[in-house]
Image (tube, rainbow, N blue to C red):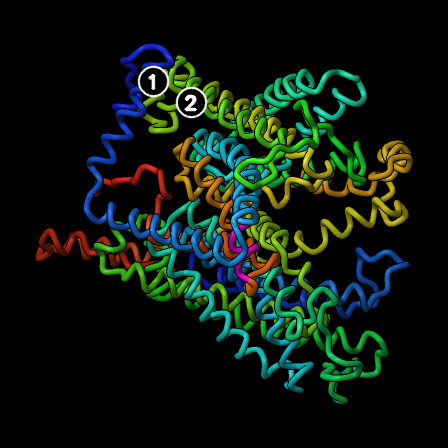
Amino acid sequence: MSSTVTDTSTGATGAVSRALGEFYGSLRSLSAKNRRNLGIMAAVVVLFSIWAIATEGWNLFMQRVVDGVDNGFIYAAMALALVLIYKATTVVNFAQGEMAMFGTYITFVFSSDWGLPMWLSILMAMLVSALAAAGIERTLIRQFDPSNHLAITIVTLSLFLILGALAGVIWAYDGKGLPSPFPKRNETFGFLGADVEYSSVFTWITVIVTVVLVTLLLNRTKIGLAFRAVSTNLESSRLAGVHIGRTLQFGWALAAAVGTLAGSLYAPTTLLTPTFMGNLLVFSFAAATLGGLDSLGGSVLAGLLIGLIQTMAGGYVDRIGGELATATALAVIVIVLAVKPSGLFGSAKVERV
Amino acid sequence: MAMVTLQEGSPKHRAYVIGAWVLAAAVLLYVPFASDIGFAPASIDKAFRVTQLNDVIAYAVAILGLNLVIGYSGQLSLGHSAFVGLGAYTTIILVSDHGWSYFATLPISAALCFSVGVIVGVPALRIRGLYLAIVTLSVAYVFPTLVLKYESLTGGPNGKKPARGEGKLEPPSWAPFSDAGRLAQPLWTYCLLLGVAAVLFVLARNFLKSRPGRALVALRDNPTSAAINGVNLPLYKTMTFGVSAAYGGIAGSMLMMNRPFASDVQFALDLAIFLVVGLVVGGAGTISGAIPGSLVFVFVPYFMSEWTNDQEGMPPGLKQITSPLFDWLETRQGGRSIAGVFFGIGLLIFVFLLPGGFIDGMRKLRARVVRVVPNPSWRRDAAAKTAAPAAIETDAAAPVPNPTH
């Protein structure tokens, strides 16, 4: 853990090359067992793809891949927000979905009531929700000892209730259409036989850029260093003079901003209602755990994986169909967690007895 | 300082304990059978109110089961709604399709839920904390989709209920309230459910006071030292999940005895979350906390939405203050959902005032009035033991006899 907290190399390029180096290093140091497991997984994926292409053709297969990736990136963005709060407080924020929903409504107010351009509204809504989350942290969360998980969980549950109902009072339950922030709306281009919407590609790019930015923020800034220190060991960082409350506040604000971004990217593909984040929360929660709760990049990959499993299982296996697609994705997660209890990319916890 | 000091085991202390039990029993009997239930507005049908009380009993059992996992073994489980639903569907299918009686289905749904609970508990052996929460959350999320998928068995989105007049719980003729008309059936159900719940509560209390119960608490407080002291962690973890699920299943069957209708939305994720809310409101790691938790679970959201729809039933003082707010809400399309805001704010106030839950607060309040001190004769015995000249060090470290025995 200490190697990630100390900062040696400089600049973004340094970070990228170091990350690549670590990646290759970890590949080389893979044990025979891990290599075998990876091999089995790859073989399963290849066999499934060949079977899928053989049964229903290349175009449909590619289309489903694209749809799965499309869903996966949205899950990944929400998972990012969840991981941030989990790292900050080690509680599940049940209100994360409702916070994102509320932030998306703020985007809606800025763009359609005030007539601001979409991008500006999203940025302003991110700012507003970050401030609001910082306020929530200060007034409701910081009153409790960080180790009092039950009380903090109840606070997030009551936020879940309050925000959901408040949005209903303010904006009613009829669906609102949020325009997409990207150009070339509803236009598609052909990619290897699949129709891809321009706006989804922009969404993917935005999510990737967000992950990179958040990673840089956590790895390159002083507050990011403090944040990582607090999430690694709260007591030690308090002894080292880190202001715990303010650091956690930063985590809440960042998570709320990312959540608002995720909601604003997701809303144009559906209708904006006070409950539109409901299903998304379960999947992003799953992505966050599958990725191993302390790995930002891992949660993105896991989000993609869940999106793909959902569309593939639902599309190709008749017995599963649309109804059980979700159940299948969740079952896969349970199996993965049973094999690797700290997720695919999480750092395994070693306890001293 | 406490106003009254009682010595443990003294006649005074015994009278106090017996008095408390008699009072509790009197309340349990008075509330449904009284001619007018204090909190019932005149417009509400009394039979409906008794039905709600029956719900309270059933959910109290469910929360008690959840408490075994969360409060006593310290594992966050968010999948309890699935077990309640499984029990409910087991009962309703056996009663309406196979003509069973309600009581005969109780052991079946308990056994079924126990086995499913053990299966869900198996991942819990390797997965901990939040990772376990997502596994159990998946169970809660998947259950309604399974109900919809196997429509021929469960009735799908239309729900399932027994045919009219079939498998009803009619009171026997010797019951004093058998001629109470529409009230007779809910009152009889109340008696039956109260009996089942009493057995389950006593079982849970005895279980937690026995060796397995203490092992469970040891496991929660420090798994490593529990294992060193010979607690079989895998066995206890899976068994706790199983027992908790069995309680949930019985609670589901009890719900069906009260209102014989099961649908997928009834047992969705919200139920799991609200059961956790009820658990924490009552107090995690307490047996009696299930009762206030369940009362809050059933009545607070109900009254919130009642008062939002119609302010007539509200206490008069409250009505004066809130009428401008409600007048404004009338003009809003989604104004009805303000009930959720009130519930959430109430929960926030609660967690700030009584962070340990209702029972913890009551205990603190009681400690201000009554102080129970251990009987000095036990202390004398213990002191005599340690002071005995023959006592070597190991003897001196022998535990003081537990005053609760």
Q: Residues within 10 Å of mark 1 (few under 14, many from 20)?
A: some
Q: Are marks 2 and 1 in contact (CB under 8 Å)?
A: yes
Q: Residues within 10 Å of mark 2 (few under 14, many from 20)?
A: some
Left or right relative to B332: residue A161: left
Q: Chain of mark 2?
A: A
Left or right relative to A87: residue B398: left
Which image quadrant is residue B182 in? bottom right
Q: Residue B349: give x, y in percent of width and height.
A: 64, 36
Task: Indicate yes or no whether the magenta region holds residue B224.
Answer: no
Q: Main secondary structure of the magenta part?
A: helix
Nearest to viewer (mark 2 / mark 1): 1
Which image quadrant is residue B189 in? bottom right
In this picture, which residue range is highlighted in magenta?
A311-317
Give me the residue at 68% from left, 29% from top.
A104
Q: What amino acid is labelled 2 in the image?
A: Thr
Mark carried by residue A215:
2
* Image quadrant occupied by the C terminus of chain A: top left
Q: How many marks?
A: 2
* Image quadrant occupied by the N terminus of chain A: top left
Q: Residue A99: give x, y in percent of width and height.
A: 63, 32
Distance of mark 2 from mark 1, alpha carbons?
A: 10 Å
